[in-house]
Amino acid sequence: MKKLTLSALFLTALFGANAHANNTITFLGEVSDQTCEVAINGATANPTVLLPTVSTADLAVAGSVAGETPFTLSVSGCTINATQALPIKTVFVGNSVTVAGNLGNTGTATNVSLQILDAVGGNAVDLTGVATVDGLNVAAGDSTASHDFAVQYYAEGAATAGTVVSSVQYAISYL
């Protein structure tokens, strides 16, 4: 009986430690006296950005990029101080992120991901964690602002033909 009790205690401790190790939900939020309506290319709900069709030859070598496509994040109806500008950060969280920090492809093409740029012709945004990007600035006395980002195909290796589908969560931060 002692062996059974000892075994039960050991298993409880083992599974209890495992259950605790990777089962954490982190909630993040923000309370602000600033508020704005957000849109991507004018769409306030479920925006879609269509990239051009590119050749596999354009993405034949790892690290190659092609099809840079701008998209505009805009804010309107902002309630700000009439004498002070309001800098706003855009926060991106990738749903499926590659080792290189790009958005993983859930479509049928292989060895291709999507890379978000902090501006048209700008630098890649590393999505391996929560990515915060400057760029939106509501001028004093104004209530709107916009910033052009871009997205492009990125070759993780020699790309094969197929669809490319990915998504990213976004929010704005007044802090």
Image (cartoon, rainbow, N blue to C red):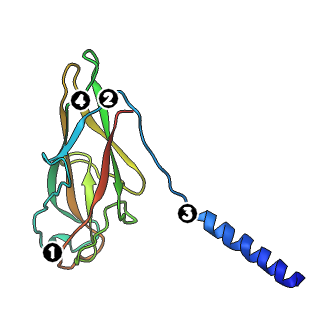
Comparing 94 with 52, the one in front is 94
Earlier-in-chain disc, 3 versus 4: 3
Q: CA distance from mark 4 to mark 1?
A: 45 Å
Q: Are marks 3 and 1 in contact (CB under 8 Å)?
A: no
Q: Looking at the rendered structure, which numbered label has been put on residue 23?
A: 3
Q: Are marks 2 and 4 in contact (CB under 8 Å)?
A: yes
Q: Which residue is mark 2?
A: 34
| Relative image position of residue 61 (x, y in whole percent) | 25, 72
Categorize mark 1 by other alpha carbons within 10 Å: few (<14), some (14-19), many (20+).
Answer: few
Q: Secondary structure at mark 3?
A: loop
* Image point (12%, 69%), residue name: 54
| Relative image position of residue 32 (x, y in whole percent) | 38, 30
Q: Secondary structure at mark 1?
A: helix
Earlier-in-chain disc, 2 versus 3: 3
* Image point (15%, 51%), residue name: 70
The quadrant the N terminus occupies is: bottom right
